[in-house]
Amino acid sequence: MNKLLIVAFLLTGPCHYALAQLKEIRNIQHRLPSIKEEKARIDALNQLAFFMQLKSPDSSYHLANEARELAARLEYKKGLADAYKTFGGLLLDQNSYLCARYLHDALDLYRELGFKQGESMTLMNISNLLYVDQDSTHAKAYLVQAYQIGQTLEKDSVLSIILMNMLYRDTCFQCAHMDIMFKKGRDIAQKYHDERMILSYKQLQGYILWNRGDYAKGVKILEDGLPLCDSAGDEFEKMNIYQRLC
């Protein structure tokens, strides 16, 4: 389950859902050749690299590396941080040492720049890496830091993603606080009409019910989500549902 949980957590900026990602990929690919301003080109390369992480990891790496090289030449720290964060995401389940190094480099730059959104998401990614490495104590501490910063952001779409991670990591499915966190995260997703996150919260509800012993309702919610994933083109969430049903 770790790899699946980590993917949702990689989103930066406003939440994006599956069809929006595909449209954005095509839009950036169309615009990229005409972008002459170097920092704007770096931002576009990094954004495209981020969107391509699941679709094509090799392409994601090459795009992020091009962004990194340009950013290093211009000493554009935001561009470097974004590229490092993508490198960390690509290495998450492959090389813990390099993943940690890139994520911490990104974290240092985001903190230097005062970019709280990037700091919050990178803390969450470090938390997920530590969970993969079975260091749950430190992982939880990083996730709490991410949550605390997420609460201070003017645009709270990031908080919906962090809450999703916290809910998946919480093994105490009977606790009342879980219902409060679930409602808060789902409400944020609905506020921004983020169809991908709304779908993810719906599937999480099925998972929670299943773990609370209400198997029939939980399975029905999960199974009902499969055609929704097909209509949205959301292969990630579809795979996630199948893993839970197996």
Image (cartoon, grey):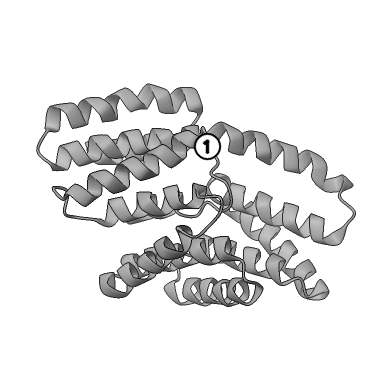
The answer to whether any part of residue 131 appears in the image is yes
Q: Position of residue 150 (x, y in %)?
A: 47, 59
Q: Position of residue 121 (x, y in %)?
A: 50, 61
Q: Determine which residue is flagged by label 1.
A: 192
Q: Quadrant of residue 16?
A: top right
Q: Position of residue 233 (x, y in %)?
A: 50, 29
Nearer-the-camera pick, 13 or 222:
13
Q: Residue at x 60, y 53 (%)?
A: 50
Q: Residue at x 52, y 71 (%)?
A: 103
Nearer-the-camera pick, 7 or 239:
7
Q: Residue at x 66, y 34 (%)?
A: 23
Label 1 element class:
loop
Q: Is residue 34 left or right of residue 163?
A: right
Q: Residue at x 45, y 54 (%)?
A: 9
Asked if 105 appears above or below 206 in the picture, the reply is below
Q: Position of residue 117 (x, y in %)?
A: 56, 60
The answer to whether any part of residue 94 appears in the image is no
Asked if 2 appears above or below 15 in the picture, the reply is below
The residue type indicated by label 1 comes to Tyr
